[in-house]
Amino acid sequence: MTGGRIKKIEKFLENQSFFLTYGDDLKAVNISKLLQFHNKQKKLVTLTAVQPPGRFGILEIKGNEVINLSEKPPGDGNWINGGYYVLEPAVFDDIHNDSDVWETNQLQKIIGKNQVSAFKYNDTYQPMDTINDKQKLQKMWDSNNAYWKIWK
């Protein structure tokens, strides 16, 4: 599980802050700014908050009449865990074995201690949860229009 996998790297970190990321999306987070934000917040965890893209057309209905259609709007305004973190080594104290799940066990406990800050990432974000997502990202890459490719 995710907590157990995180615990396995503890011995390599020499009691230092560290970055952690998931591999199921693409975004061009400025990690220098993320680290600066984390250091200012003085929390155990900083996660990158993102607003997911809209997946469906939104209907505005009055009574039984459709009065507006917004085809796949940018999102609903909610923030989600974007999966890029800066963590302090004290997070290892709450991870006890390989079956620990970071998101539902340790992260929830740390949130309960008011030790998690959110770095709001407002640029393009595309998850890669489905084959359609993968194809969309591949098309961006193939057309040399990959927003996450910030190097020249």
Image (cartoon, rainbow, N blue to C red):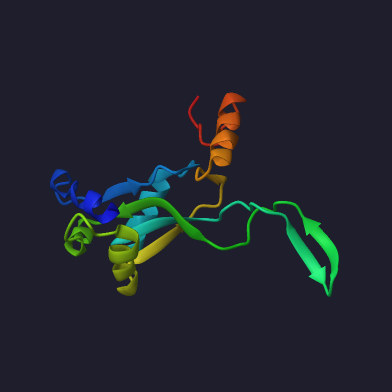
Is residue 43 among what the camera can see? no
Q: Residue at image x 51%, y 31%?
A: 149
Is residue 120 among what the camera can see? yes
Q: Is residue 25 left or right of residue 140?
A: left
Residue 60 on image: x %, y %: 78, 66
In the rendered image, which quarter is residue 65 located in? bottom right
Q: Residue at image x 27%, y 53%?
A: 1
In the rendered image, which quarter is residue 41 located in? bottom left
In this view, 108 is above or below 55: below
Q: Is residue 149 left or right of residue 71?
A: left
Foreground: 58 or 140?
58
In this view, 96 is above or below 8: below
Residue 147 on image: x %, y %: 56, 36
Total residue callouts: 0
Foreground: 56 or 122?
56
Q: Is residue 29 left or right of residue 96?
A: right
Residue 59 on image: x %, y %: 76, 62
In the rendered image, which quarter is residue 46 located in? bottom left
